[in-house]
Image (spheres, helix red, strand yellow):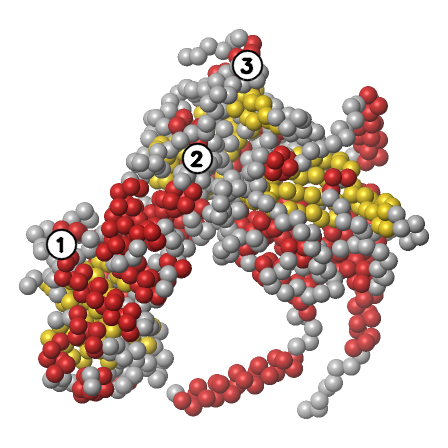
Amino acid sequence: MGYVAVKGGREAIERACDLAEFRRSGTGSAPLELRQILEQLPLAVDRAMGEGGLHAPEHAALALRQSAGDSFEAAFLLRAHRATLPRLAETLPDGTGSLRVVRRISSAFKDVPGGQILGHTPDYSLRLLELDPLEDRGRRRAHIREKVLAGIGGLDPLPDEFPRVVDHLRREGLLEDVASDDPEPFDITRRPLSFPAPRSARLQALARGETGGLLLLAYSSTRGYGHVHPTLAEMRVGYLPLRVVHPVSGEPVVVGEVPVTEAEVVSRFANTDGEPRFQVGYGLCLGHNEVKAISMGVLDRCMRTEDPRSPAEDQEFALYHSDGIESMGFTNHWKLPHYVDFLSDLDRLRKAREGWRARS
Amino acid sequence: MDVLLRAHGLTKRFGEGCPSCLDETGARVGTNRCPRCGAVWAVRDASVELRREEAVGIVGESGSGKSTLVRLLHFDLRATAGWLEAARIPALEPIPDLYPKGSDWTRDLLSMDGFRQRRARDLCMGIVYQHPHLGLRMGVSSGGNIAERLLSAGWRSIGAMRGRAGGLLERTEIPLSRMDEPPKVFSGGMQQRVQIAKALSGDPPILLLDEVTTGLDLSVQARVLDLVRSLRDELRLSMLVVSHDLGVVNLLCQRTLVMKNGEVVESGLTDQILQDPQHPYTQLLVSSQLQ
Amino acid sequence: MRAREWIERPRGAEPAFAFLDDGAKKDVRRALLKAVAIPGYQVPYGSREMPLARGWGTGGIQITLSILLPSDVVKVIDQGCDGSVNAVNIRKFYARVADVETTTDTAAATLVQTRHRIPEERMRDDQILVLQVPYPEALREVEPSEMQTRRMHAEADYARMWLRLYEDVVRFGEIRLSYRYPCTVNGRHVMDPSPVPRWDVPKLHMADTLFLFGAGRERRIYAVPPHTRVEPLEFDDHRFRVEDFSGKACGRCGATGTFLDEVVLPDGSRAHFCSDTGLCDKRKEGTWTSS
């Protein structure tokens, strides 16, 4: 029997890429415009930006279109693109006090200074699939625009200030102290993580983490695989102005704003050193992604447990396995040829079986 | 002296077993493991009796099955075969339907449901393991470790529990000031003593000791053994003492069983076994240890 | 419903009363019967997905929808308040799928569904309280594995829960469990009363009302029938205590002896208001008489 080599690999690969593009080109529907994706699927755009670690809404919309809706691929495209970009400046460190708030709630108190601003959220809608295919979307859209915007001039503006809930708790001495030595933040894009990782590194990694992975860990920790009993002290959604030092004048200037979601989670007291106090877990991510920010806050607190016992409390476990680009890439890599590896395994198995048969 | 516990034909096999096992394993052959099917006979056909206020030693090398035997008696492992009965012990009275009508012996404890097994065990036995993390919750305070037993038994006063725990810790020579510290911050010897305190918290008539001094420094060993001996006398305990060290068994036990490859090869009075061993393996063991 | 029934159903037929199909209601009702027969025991059931998110009351909703009658008058509260978004949403849903009358007056309701509070007014024997439960398992605090906690309940093995309370007292001088305080029901099962504050736990004991607990995401239903003992876990020398509102009164109606919400004012000071807004309204209107 002759040996048959596998040829035409390159052609096959090119054809496969063509087929992928063919598949997402549709069979007659109008091509998706970036603007449609940006405007009508904003949460998918935000999620891709957050996991890609790049604020570039149009690029994110493009990535979603190019990846045919695969959120892992979209984040990957953005992350890869980011790696090609030069770093022109670093923003000045800032608190989020300057956040332009569009949504702000606290679960810890019934009412708080600044108020409970529900903002835009589907949290309170009934999850009933709107099944009527004949519905005139254009008319519906016009109706909702008219409904929301009518009488908008007569509404009270948002308050200027939203005093932080945790600041109130801190003033009463109910929170742990936070070191104010303000160390230089770790840069996870330039240096690999080593453990125990400094808090800035942990938070950066969480901020870019894959939403589902972080959710799994945070959820597990509140279901018994951990000892955090969280209360959402405050969650804010809004636009954060970024400042850099002007290259010519040397003065700080605002160069734009990015959408972010911020969550501060307070956990039940557990310290035995000194006066009992609550601890705070902090989460901040790019884009409007509440599940991720809350999960970050819970995990930030988990990873500071003195006696870590569950996966969520183990820094290494949580941080090594929650980057979507890494985890997705590696899991997909099993599809690459491994036949040499496998042959080696086969050889070992055959030898061991010979030995076993010889002995029995 | 009346018998408290009697076990017959205790067997623990790991793996499927095959027709060749009987001939290919055991003390005579020199292995626990069947070369044909790979089954491990950790304990085979062992019988033991424990009398009131008596200490019985179980000696052998590692792999002899001595620890497995004790684990079977403590229901840590499920026996493959054999039966185990307890005599009329006041501590066991609370368990309903444990004794068949008119009998002075319980039903076979090995074939009982897990729930009643565990209850019976908690009421009449205490155990101390070689590795403290097997017998203690390392993250819970020492007092808490003892309190857990009391809480199981229905104690509901913190003051009373701390009193009892404090008393037991003092008796095992642990300073009262350390009652609220977790065992993980203690030395090996102290951890063993906390285990002993915990094992005694329910006033059990039977104490099982599984290699409790192995791995400790000699001076620490001596202290722990001394404590065990004085507790035995003071509390009139029945004890099963597992050790590879004949010296330990000589110090504590009136009778001894010798195990090899899962089987009991010799049993009798400790003095006799040490001075006039009959089985070749026992002779080897004795000559290699007591010089 | 069988495939044939489905194909032959009359077109334009009304959707099922109260949203759930017969099969779903049957599942829930069977679970409820078993739950009432074994007070405090968590009955597994085939929880359906609802148009509200898991964690937002799907368990409570399934119970209500399964027992709702057209003649019922329904009150829905969240943290004691009829006006909270969660309560408003659910009430809207019931009005839509069952066309029942709704109320904010506890005394006028036949069925009250609640998240994390029990109404301050003592409920009657012709009323039912349905509680929304996030975590049905009281022992989750000490054991993450469901397999283990089911065994612990089966064997009434609650020592580790008691041990957690003991350790808290020893380390912090206080039991830290606040809402979800574990209680022994009918002298047998330890139950999680849902995240109601400690203040509400005594209301469950020997009440006239039927209490039904639904955990949709976790797929469990449990119940406390009328005139059942519900006793919070406590020590003889460290008793169960409710939240302390001494020296405080409602800033709106002046009530004392009721659970008060704490609100932070812009100047940083604090004010207190009745958590039970329905009762606060009645007091303010002067229509409330204590019975």
Residue A185 coordinates in the image, percent (x, y): 71, 56
Q: Earlier in the sequence, mark 2 or mark 3?
A: 2
Badge 2: chain ID:
C
Please give left or right for residue A47 compared with residue B41 in the image: right
- Furthest-left residue in this view: B1
Q: Nearer the viewer, mark 2 or mark 3?
A: 3
Mark in the foreground, 3 or 1? 3
* Secondary structure category for the residue under label 1: loop
Disc 3 on helix, strand or loop?
A: loop
Q: Amino acid at mark 1?
A: Ile
How far apart in space, not on screen, are marks 2 and 3 (Cα)?
29 Å
Residue A88, image x and y in percent? Answer: 86, 58
Locate residue B164, reporting x and y percent.
Answer: 25, 48
Gap between marks 3 and 1 measured at Cα? 65 Å
Residue drawn at point x = 73 percent, y = 42 percent: A96
Neighbours of disc 1 within 10 Å: few (<14), some (14-19), many (20+): some
Label 3 sits on residue:
C253
- Is residue A110 visible in the rendered image? The answer is yes
User: Tag on residue B89?
Assistant: 1
Q: Is residue B214 left or right of residue A119?
A: left
Question: In this rendering, do the residues under marks 2 and 3 share a single chain?
Answer: yes
